[in-house]
Image (spheres, helix red, strand yellow):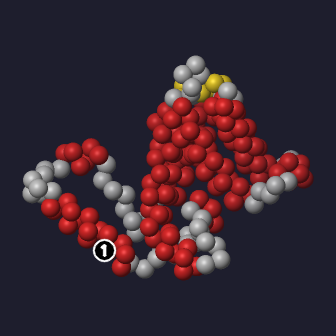
Amino acid sequence: MFRPATDGGASIWLSPGEAALLRTLVTAITDLLVDPERPAPPSAAAVATTPAAAPADGSADLFDDLEKMFNETAAPPPQPPADPVLARLLPDAYPGDPEAAGEFRKYTESSLREAKKYFAQTLLETLPDEGGRVKLTADQARDWMRALNDVRLMFGVRLEVTEDFEQQLGALDPKDPRVAAFEVYGWLGSLQESLVRALAG
């Protein structure tokens, strides 16, 4: 489990199997968060290597921003995700008011997707391929915590986990193929809880 680090971050030792499992689960989250109707903006590296054709006064940038704002305003509000996992990751802000929820989603869903992908990418970039010691800064540890929470949400929805998780697990037949998934869910919870304690300590 995670231990506090002297610089305010956290550290943990992961076996090769644990590292591979985390990589697989977090990659599944990043794949799920990709919105084919809203491509991600170009990376900073891509922008830096693109020849500049805009006027020096920046007027083209202003027109581009205004055009983007107009298009977003004119576009119809996106519908809530059909996938139940995405519906938990990107919940309605106003469950009882579809119109208000749609308007809120139109302006926030894209940035929320990108933020969650950023947290997941931080975890992937700081996770050793073959396991071993993971040393995180405080900011990286907080990104890990958010990414782990999203993975647990995915598991919780797929497994239909309730507040009586221990009873659900205990009631399963040892030969039930879901046992392994429930145990991974429990391990993720312990991992996340230890990270919270490490950051608080």
Vertical placement of 49 versus 95: above or below?
Answer: above
Vertical placement of 25 versus 129: above or below?
Answer: below
- The residue drawn where x is 36% and y is 79% is 74
Residue 39, located in which quarter of the rendered image? bottom left
- The residue drawn where x is 72% and y is 42% is 189
- The residue drawn where x is 54% and y is 80% is 99
Give the side of residue 183 with respect to residue 63, left or right. Answer: right
Name the foreground residue: 4 vs 175: 4
Vertical placement of 75 versus 189: above or below?
Answer: below
Quadrant assignment for the N terminus: top right
Mark 1 burial class by Cα count in 10 Å: few <14, some 14-19, many 20+: few
Task: List x then y, in percent, for residue 152.
Answer: 67, 49
Name the foreground residue: 2 vs 72: 72
Vertical placement of 171 versus 95: above or below?
Answer: above
- The residue drawn where x is 48% and y is 64% is 109
Q: Circle 1 — which element?
A: helix
Give the side of residue 101 with respect to residue 76, left or right. Answer: right
Q: Amino acid at mark 1?
A: Phe
Residue 146, located in which quarter of the rendered image? top right
Quadrant assignment for the C terminus: top right
Instruction: Using the rendered image of the protein, determine whether residue 177 is visible from the camera's viewpoint.
Output: no
Total number of numbered labels? 1
| Residue with the most extreme top position | 6
Task: List x then y, in percent, for residue 139.
Answer: 51, 35
Instruction: Using the rendered image of the protein, determine whether residue 49 is visible from the camera's viewpoint.
Output: yes
Task: List x then y, in percent, for residue 60.
Answer: 16, 62
Q: Say which residue label 1 marks.
A: 70
